[in-house]
Image (cartoon, rainbow, N blue to C red):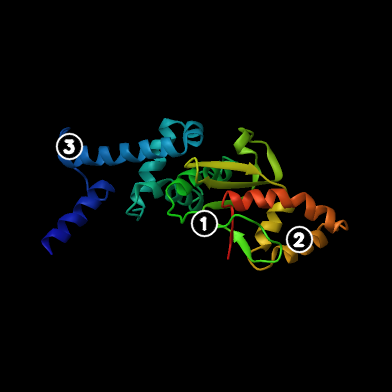
Amino acid sequence: MLEREVQRRLVDFINDKVELPDEPRNPIRIYKELVHYRFVEVLKNAMPDFCDILGSKRLDTLIFDFIQSKPRSPFIWQVPSLFMNFLLDFNKVDDISFASDLMWFESIEVELLMGAYEEPQDDFFSWDENFSLSMSTRTKILNHAVNQDDYTYLEEHPLLMYYHFDEASVYFQEITPFMFIFLSDLENMLPSEALLSVCKRYQVQELAEVKNLLQSSLEEFVYLNILQRN
């Protein structure tokens, strides 16, 4: 019980719920500064562009608020995602119109790099077998081309991000709204059914032509483990 009480008071000190003695070399104060610095270091490495836009003073303030919220995760690599969710949930960066898009783009790279994946098994694509996006892939419709450092508002800017197994790196690829919907529909449909559905949505009549156009891209997606057989 005593150990638990000590841990609770330490957390309260870090979160500024208990006032620290004013000695400059107070060990708890030093520890608190080290915790803050570690968060700054992690976030600046994971989200460099967004942190630059915030500026050091505002970033420090937001990190202070974030620490006070007691983020819960045993993994330091999850801090960028938790920080992003905190800022969005509590409307901390509503004045930056592209904040959500830029934070997602930068933080998802860390998430994909740290993921635990099985080695790719599939080497061919079939229109009549079940496929879906793999665990090493993320897709999202953004409203800003943040991957191009362009923060102008766009109606839709679909982006695909994936972990490249051979190079142990994360890459992004701009995709069309057509492709985004097709990939999303694969969760509940065969590829042939998803193609029919999205062509109907876009009032496309040349089904066979579209199928031929998509074939090479989908084969590459399977090779890169963007798509996997269910």
Mark-to-mark CA distance, 1 and 2: 22 Å
Q: Is residue 26 left or right of residue 190?
A: left
Of all residues, the one furthest to the front in this rendering is 123
Local crowd size for mark 2, using a 10 Å CA cut-off: few (<14), some (14–19), many (≥20): many
Mark 1: which amino acid?
Met
Q: 16 and 212: which one is in front?
A: 212
Say which label, 3 or 1, has the lower sequence index.
3
Local crowd size for mark 3, using a 10 Å CA cut-off: few (<14), some (14–19), many (≥20): few
Mark-to-mark CA distance, 3 and 2: 67 Å
Please name the residue shown 15% across and 33% down the image.
Answer: 25
Mark-to-mark CA distance, 3 and 1: 49 Å
Q: 170 and 83: which one is in front?
A: 170
What residue is disc 2 on? 195
What residue is disc 1 on? 135
Of all residues, the one furthest to the left in this rendering is 2
Mark 2: which secondary structure? helix
What residue is disc 3 on? 22
Residue 156 higher or lower than 127, as above or below: above
